[in-house]
Amino acid sequence: MKKTILITGASSGFGLMLATRLHAQGFHVIGTSRDPEKYPNLPFKLIRLDLNDDASIGALPQELARQASRLDVLVNNAGYMVTGLAEETPLEQARQQFETNFWGTVKVTNALLPTFRAQKSGQIITVSSIVGLIGPPNLSFYTASKHAVQGFFKSLRFELNPFNIQVSMVEPVWFKTNLANHAVKASGRISDYDSYRRKANAATQKGIDEAQAPDAVVNTITKLIGTREPRFSNPVGKMTGMFLFLQSYAPRMFEGSILKSVETA
């Protein structure tokens, strides 16, 4: 029997590529979008889900049950990014970043855990970011939201082990998706930061401009779905190994490389 896979945020970016790939491979793919009616020609089923709407999340298990008799894999992919310096980011923008990236992901996961527990099997794969493992400038609250997501699932995986529910994270570096195009910029301005802000924005833009094609992330998630005992943490992309090694074993060198990336941008 083919696996049923639910992918949040499946109308663009990683989610769309992954859903299309898995559908072509014969999986029963169900995607989610805030506005599914805008995408009538996708080859897989798309249902409505808004991570900021509790009623939408609450209706998800029942809607899913109408589409499939079981759920084998949940891929938490939906989210967005707030860019900007920490002190210049209004708290309302920061709170909304957490409401979507952290609390939205937690609520969706919790809504589907009874389904997984009843089956005594399942797999949860969450698309995080390399910034959930390191802390670059100009992305303070996006970074914080991803650290929170990492911490939540790091603990949850032990609690779900008795039910044969596997938990994995995927932590990409910059990849060419709509994430950067849909990013929300911090609206505050403090003159003391004018020079640094220009350099930080330039460094962020350089990362976006030099981003890799997203195939590697889709390949990683696809491989995790086919793995009997998947790893918890799965960084993806150029330089991830070096970043994590330097952060752990040569922190001064790591910090120097981050500072230099801003100064030379």
Image (spheres, rainbow, N blue to C red):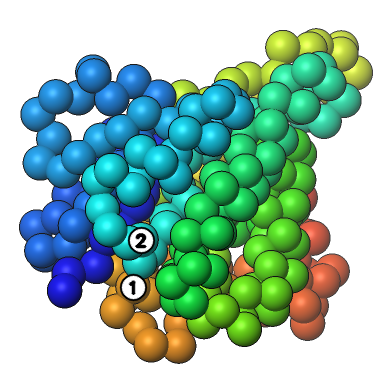
Q: Is residue 47 above or below residue 263?
A: above
Identify the residue shown where x is 73% and y is 20%. 93
Front tag of 2 and 1? 2
Where residue 71 sits: x, y (%)? 35, 61
Q: CA distance from mark 2 to mark 1?
A: 13 Å
Residue 225 is tagged as 1
Where residue 244 sits: x, y (%)? 66, 72
* Front-lying residue, 12 or 241: 12
- Residue occupying the far bottom of the picture: 229
Residue 42 is tagged as none
Viewed as shown, does residue 125 lie left or right of 52? left
> Is residue 28 in view from this perspective?
yes
Q: Which comes before the other along the chain, label 2 or label 1? A: 2
Query: Can you say which quadrant of the picture contains the C terminus?
Result: top right
Question: Pointer 2 and pointer 1: residues touching (CB < 8 Å)?
Answer: no
Name the residue carrying label 2. Answer: 71
Q: Considering the numbered disc 1 on the image, is that residue within a helix, a strand or a loop?
A: helix
* Front-lying residue, 14 or 162: 162
Looking at the rendered structure, the kind of residue marked 2 is: Leu
